[in-house]
Image: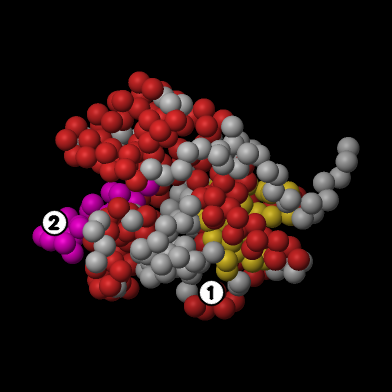
Amino acid sequence: MAIDRRPPALALMGPTASGKTALALEWAGRLGGEIVSVDSALVYRGLDIGAAMPSAAEQAAVPHHLLDVRDPWQTYSAAEFAADARVAIDGIVARRRLPILAGGTGLYFQALLHGLADMPGADPALRAQLEREAETRGWAALHAELAAVDPTAAARIHATDAQRIQRALEVYRSSGRPITEWQREAVRERLPLRVLPLVLAPKDRAALHARIERRFDLMLEQGFLDEVRALRALPQLAAHPAPLDLPAIRAVGYRQAWEFLDGGEADPAGFRERAIAATRQLAKRQTTWLRGELGARWFDPECDGAHLERALSMFLG
């Protein structure tokens, strides 16, 4: 059997609040690694507290990549992420360091590790039309429409996931082909690494929910609402006609905080509960995606530390 001589890399995946960041930092410090963030909120400047940005001390101790690469009024696609991540990885390998890909954004991992389909681009007019239909018919009705034309996509997209329902219908209406067909034709450009995919996920859902709640309360103590107030004061966001449609502001927690500061929710406790519930829903969607990541090994961060170390040791030799 031929020996795989490609440089090694670790892919540390998992739902939000599962402990990926702490483990990535510990392994990077111990193994001479650099961290490539695979997080669709951390790419935006100003999303620090609510997105759990690594601290200045942590970034000084371990090199990080793909943090703060866009302003919050800009967009950043999965294809752009994959291209930027490859550049970062090439530099890490050239320095004879270990790339550690750490985060919870499944689409970013998909783009980087498996490739993306060359499907139709965004159509602003069609998106606006779908938004108008959603206002009158509701996203549940549009999800039912998606189920009729692309049952595979509808099965994996939650009926309340407006962004993905909109994108799937946009692709179908503009091309006449279901998004599932486009995705099957993804360009498979092999990553020049041998990757160990690891999933951190507590076996007990209640334990993960408790971690999510504790982390959000800590964010509130650290000034999360003040951070969102500062974002709202930025001229580019203050003048934006629909800031809640921006990917940065749609990030979990930020959307709920923005709506709370708009006056849509007068009760701080109600805002807290809505933000925690949205984070739990995000964790559920992330876990669902991860179950389809074939070849990934699952570990409970609470009790599988020894097994994780053994998997790491066997992989790195």
Identify the residue position indicated by label 1 in the image: 58
At x 19% / y 39%, what residue is drawn?
135
Quadrant (top left/top right/bottom left/bottom right) for the C terminus? bottom right
Q: Residues within 10 Å of mark 2 (few under 14, many from 20)?
A: few
User: Residue 117, position in %: x, y?
Assistant: 56, 38
Image quadrant assignment for residue 80: bottom right
Asked whether residue 313 is drawn in magenta, I would say no
At x 53% / y 34%, what residue is drawn?
183
Identify the residue position indicated by label 2 in the image: 264
User: Would you place residue 13 above or below residue 114 in this image?
Assistant: below
Q: Does 28 sit left or right of 132 as displayed?
A: right
User: Would you place residue 95 above or below residue 300 in this image?
Assistant: below
Asked whether residue 265 is drawn in magenta, I would say yes
At x 29% / y 73%, what residue is drawn?
234
User: Residue 189, position in %: x, y?
Assistant: 68, 43
Q: Is residue 67 visible?
A: yes
At x 47% / y 74%, what residue is drawn?
55
User: Would you place residue 183 above or below residue 218 in this image?
Assistant: above
- Mark nearest the camera among 1 and 2 is 2
User: Residue 212 or 107: which is nearer the viewer?
Assistant: 107
Q: Does 297 sit left or right of 21 as displayed?
A: right
Image quadrant assignment for residue 40: bottom left
Type of residue at label 1? Glu
Q: Which residues are magenta?
A: 259-282
Which mark is first along the chain, 2 or 1? 1
User: Residue 137, position in %: x, y?
Assistant: 19, 32
Q: Does 82 sit left or right of 201 as displayed?
A: right
Q: Secondary structure at mark 2?
A: loop
Type of residue at label 2? Gly
